[in-house]
Amino acid sequence: MYEFNYRKAASLDEAKDLFSKGEDAKYMSGGMTLLPTLKQRLARPSDVIDLAAVPDMSGIAVTGDTVSIKARTPHAVVAANAEVKKAIPALAKLAGGIGDPMVRNRGTIGGSLANNDPAADYPAAIVGLGATIHTDRRTIAGDDFFQGLFETALEEDELIIQVDFPIPDKAGYMKFPNPASRYCIVGVMVSSKGGNVRVGVTGAGACAFRVKEMEDALKANFAAEAVEKISIPDGDLNSDIHASAEYRAHLVTVMAKRAVAEANG
Amino acid sequence: MTVSFSMTVNGKPVKGECEDRTLLVQYLREHMGLTGTHVGCDTTQCGCCTVHIDGIPMKSCTMLAVSADGCEVTTIEGLAKDGQLHPMQDAFRENHGLQCGFCTPGMVMSAIGIVDRHRGEKLDEKTVRHELEGNICRCTGYHNIVKAVLAASEVMNKA
């Protein structure tokens, strides 16, 4: 790991102030991606600004038709929360399948989203459930948040505060994990709410995306058979040692089918 | 730069100083001589370095030492009390839940986490295997490890 200056922020304002003073500062939430990246010398920030001591950044509230999760809430807390399990079981399941228990104990939703790893789980929930992301300065629609490989709509020093998930009528999440890292080779979140259907895919492309053709088919018939003949083009999909683009395209259909079956219980 | 912090390690207060970038596992092993916590992969995948931070299993190779400021850290060395092995350690011995032993400290620390998460429930093999996902063993094939965790959960749930 290269040298850096560790800074512990006691408030959001202090975090932003420290960020602006650093030559090339990085925020750290749980550090489950940042620290492995630093250990491999893939990044060289001047300052690491730890958000752990900023108050009021963790917690879950379920009100009416929304599940609100604060940015520093660890995955394990989301997975075990009785209200989340009841309101959006697919979201609790998704959180409970990230990495492994120790990663879930420390990794946070805000950190995962701000990092926007193409194989992360949460992005599928953001686009597949139509979430809204609240930052320290504005509100960003989930559909506009992910902009490319590790690229989001966030400005340099912008901080995620909370994520709001509308509670769907039904939803299902299925992923095909990499057996070593448990990251998604492909993950699909399918949801239906008041006649609107969303199909959110992670792992397959540069960042999470929706599959309109599947959404239209599911609007007409919310059943696994409705998507089984729909395949997405593999041209822009990720291709690596773990899975070719063609295989990923195939998995999108399979995972979508299983996610719909799960949503239908 | 040097950072200073204070934490509790295995019940004893520690005032520490190290580089900003020092990982908790390095601090425990190299500064404190607590070499029971192992580094297996250094890429956050093998779980050998698992310790408890405020009672919750975390990977000490993926946490800065300074981030443990104000926390209670428990390592494998802190489990036995008054010369008595922790029930999980005892169960690993009784069931021969190890061969080379390299992964064992991390296995034991995360296995205690499994029992803690399912307090009062009867653990089954499937749950144990699923929740040991973050700990890699290259010798045993996991069979006796799973047996040990199930046996320890019976003892721990009675306590």
Image (cartoon, coloured by chain):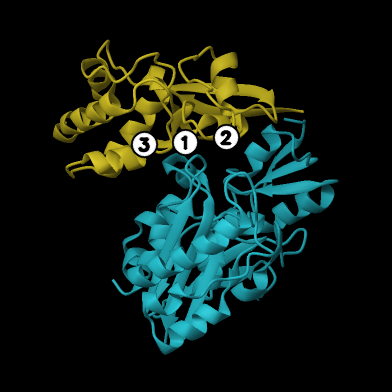
Chain colours: A cyan, B yellow
Q: Are marks 3 and 2 on the same chain?
A: yes
Residue B151 lies, in percent from the top left, at: 19, 28
Q: Is residue B53 above or below residue A216?
A: above
Q: CA distance from mark 1 to mark 2?
A: 8 Å
Q: Please, what is the three-letter code of the amino acid marked with disc 1?
A: Met
Q: For this view, does B65 lie left or right of residue A44?
A: left
| Residue corresponding to mark 3 | B132
Which quadrant of the figure has residue B134?
Answer: top left
Give the spatial CA distance, label 3 vs label 1. Answer: 13 Å
A155 sits to left or right of B102: right
Circles 1, 2 touching at the beta carbon (< 8 Å): yes
Disc 3 element? loop
Q: Secondary structure at mark 1?
A: strand
| Disc with the residue nearer the chain's start (3 vs 2) | 2
Say which residue appears at 77% left-offset and 51% top-offset.
A19
Q: Are marks 3 and 2 in contact (CB under 8 Å)?
A: no
* Residue sitting at the far right: A23
Residue at 75 percent across and 58 percent down: it is A157
